Amino acid sequence: MDPFVEMSIQFAVPLALLIATYFTGTAFERRHYASIRERELRYRSLPAVTFRSVPPSWKATECTLITGSVVISVDYFKRFLSGLRMIFGGRVKAYETLLDRARREALLRLKEDAVERGYHAVVNVRLETCRIANARNSERVAGLEVLAFGTGLKLLNAP
Amino acid sequence: MKFDPSLPEDGINVSRAHPLREALLLVGGVVAIGAAAAVAVAVAADLAVPHIPIELEARLFSGWFDRGVEDGEAIAPRERLLAQLLNRMARHWPENPYVFEIAIWDEPEPNAVALPGGVIAVTNALLESVESENELAFVLGHELGHFHNRDHLRGLGRGIAFSLLLVAVGVGGGGSAVQLASLAGQFAQRDFDRDQEIEADRFGLVLLAAEYGHVSGAEAFFEHLPELDEPPEGALASYFSTHPVNADRIQALHAAASEMGWELRGERQPLPSLRPTR
């Protein structure tokens, strides 16, 4: 094959993917952040705190396990950026927004679960992350789960 | 205890940086490093190659390349003819240390290659398209030029050194970085090849003039093989082709001929048919 054509195919496909995923990734991110901000405002009066025990002034009547989790993956463009970062070092800025969104989304889902089930507060909130391996190639990460969990409380004197 | 429902400021855990700016910066860095490393590796290979003794070269590469001797009887006369012509040309290079061998490859592209160890391979397609002994002599002289300048090793040395570089990058970074580095390296390598081809042409001309007293046939060789180096479209095209487009080489050929006072016209020797007898 003509080397020029060969080279074009070799590089045009990844380049097209890069451009496409940059735009889709940016659009998804903008929409997700808008949703996160709106819901954070809506649920901000529900305390989700890291106390390990119920504060003495709260009169709790009922408790249960409340969870919220989200599974995320990296788009092609962000993976490309992080691949380059692996050479030069420094902040992997491309992943920061991704993980920020995942943590906030997991906490929001926890709060939504609590509200839906009539709980007034969640204490002892913890965040866990867990890698999901790619079955075909266990070296690579297929995704990441962020799990938020805590103890939901029904209170006589809701704060 | 009172609960404070205020939200943290947005973006505390997120760096303010445009992803495209970041991409440009990183890609630029990789390309610059890749190109610099490729040039360094190529220069190192070029410096090392002249110090490889020819006996070592012959020992290292003997049997590496397919000499393409198929059903020996039918091919033998053609090989003998080529070897005789090659020896006549090589006689004008008295300090030649090689013992050359001829290989005929059955490939559809007209081409000739100088291989480490002193093997000159020509394709059937090339043998079928040359129209005089002088043209063929020029092709062989050109390949002798590659041996004289030790280009055949340089290319290989660069290739090996460059693969090592790619492996190093591949270990350190992702697949995309390897692709970028290899692109940068290909650019760096192509440029060396162009100069090497023109140098080899010049050496071929010296031998041609010494053998026949004129350099007729050299230009004809390019004219008969327009498909050998058909220039692709676009300004970058001649940069992408391994061989400089024929126009470049013909121009260099004219310049060399007028500089050295070689006659571009002259009587050409006929050539017996070089079609495979099957």
Image (cartoon, helix red, strand yellow):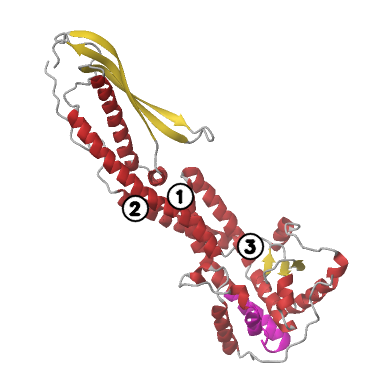
Front residue of A70/B34: it is A70
Residues at discs 1 and 3 in contact (Cβ within 8 Å): no
| Crowd class of label 1 (few under 14; some 14 to 19; many from 20; radius 10 Å) | many
Image coords of residue B174 (percent x, y): 46, 45
**On what subunit does the disc labeled 1 rest?**
B
Labels 1 and 3 in the same subunit: yes
What is the three-letter code of the residue carrying label 3? Leu
Disc nearer the start of the sequence (1/2): 2
Task: For mark 2, give the secondary structure.
Answer: helix
Task: For mark 1, give the secondary structure.
Answer: helix
What is the three-letter code of the residue carrying label 1? Ala
B262 above or below A156? Answer: below
Task: For mark 3, give the secondary structure.
Answer: helix
B70 above or below A115? Answer: below
What is the three-letter code of the residue carrying label 2? Leu
Disc nearer the start of the sequence (1/3): 3
Q: Provide the residue designation for mark 3.
A: B153
Instruction: Specify the label residue B265 is tagged with.
Output: none
